[in-house]
Structure formats: structure tokens, C-alpha cells
Image (cartoon, rainbow, N blue to C red):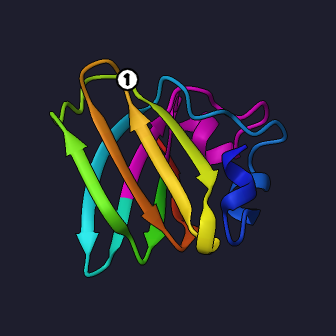
Amino acid sequence: MWIDFVHDPKPITSIYKKIPDLDDVFLAGLEFRGIDLRLEIVINNMPEDPPRKWKLRNCTKVQVDLYLLHIKNFSMIDWNPDKALNVNFAKQENDLIRLDAGSNITGVSCMFKALAVSKISAL
């Protein structure tokens, strides 16, 4: 599961009792910062017991910003932020992790060294 690759999963595990998969999510943003990449992923599954402020604001989705550190071999096919993606991570040789995020018309892939959660918020 993707959470196994996160350097410090506490921001996610403190909110979600059951970690959501990253199938049928939306990639709301993609930003390069030097050799790092920030992905803004919108998850349609709210936690079973969301924070009080999320309940008061009637939030229905969660945005998780993931940092992929020291990326290599980045490729992207036909950017479409309105298309749901399946996001997968897999361990590779040389202590690298592979990202594959895609649908039948959109795709992002790369290799990287570490994965971190930089922000989690509700929409």
C-alpha cells in the first residue's frame, strides 16, 4: 500500500483509521521544485471520523500533497486534471520508488528516492 512508502505517515494515520487506496483520485496539481515533485491528490473518501472542523465545514473530499524527492526519468502523457487516475507506488532497484499514475488517456510516471506528506486538508 502507498502509505508504506511514506517517510512519516503520521499525518495520514492520525486522520484515517483505514488508509484509502489511491484509485479513482484526481491530480489537482503537479509542481516541480528543483529535483523534487509535489503532487496534489484529491481523494473522494473522507475518514470515518473526520476532524471536527472538517465536519463543521461539510467537507466531502481530502487533498493530500505528496512530495517525491530526487525524481528521475519523469514522463507525462496528456495532462487532464478532470480525469480520475489510479496512483501506484512500487519498490525498485537501488532503493528507488516508482510512481505510476494514470488512466486510459492521462499518465504520469517517474522514479524517486523518498516520499513525504507535506499537507493534508479537506475540501
Mark 1: few/some/many CA within 10 Å (<14, 14-19, 20+): some
In the drawing, does residue 39 fall left or right of residue 114?
Answer: left
Spot occupied by residue 88 in the image (x, y as percentages of width and height): 55, 40
Determine whether 71 is above or below 54 in the image.
below
Spot occupied by residue 81 in the image (x, y as percentages of width and height): 23, 33
Residue drawn at 45 percent across, 42 percent down:
100
Q: Name, please, the residue furthest toward the right.
A: 17
Q: Residue 1: within the magenta?
A: no
Q: Residue 49: within the magenta?
A: yes
Numbered marks: total = 1
Per the image, the residue denoted by label 1 is: 84
Residue type at tag 1: Ala
Residue drawn at 51 percent across, 55 percent down:
98
Determine whether 74 is above or below 50 in the image.
below
Residue drawn at 71 percent across, 39 percent down:
50
Q: Name, please, the residue furthest toward the top.
A: 104
Observer-nearest of 39 and 112: 112
Determine whether 34 is above or below 76 in the image.
below
Observer-nearest of 44 and 113: 113
Spot occupied by residue 23 in the image (x, y as percentages of width and height): 55, 26
Q: Name, please, the residue furthest toward the left.
A: 78
Q: Name, please, the residue furthest toward the front.
A: 93
In the drawing, does residue 114 fall left or right of residue 91?
Answer: left
Spot occupied by residue 7 in the image (x, y as percentages of width and height): 68, 71
Q: Quadrant of the N terminus?
A: top right
Q: Quadrant of the C terminus?
A: top left
Determine whether 78 is above or below 10 in the image.
above
The quarter holding residue 84 reads top left
At numbered mark 1, what does the secondary structure look like: helix, strand or loop?
loop
Q: Which residues are magenta?
A: 39-63
Residue drawn at 19 percent across, 30 percent down:
80
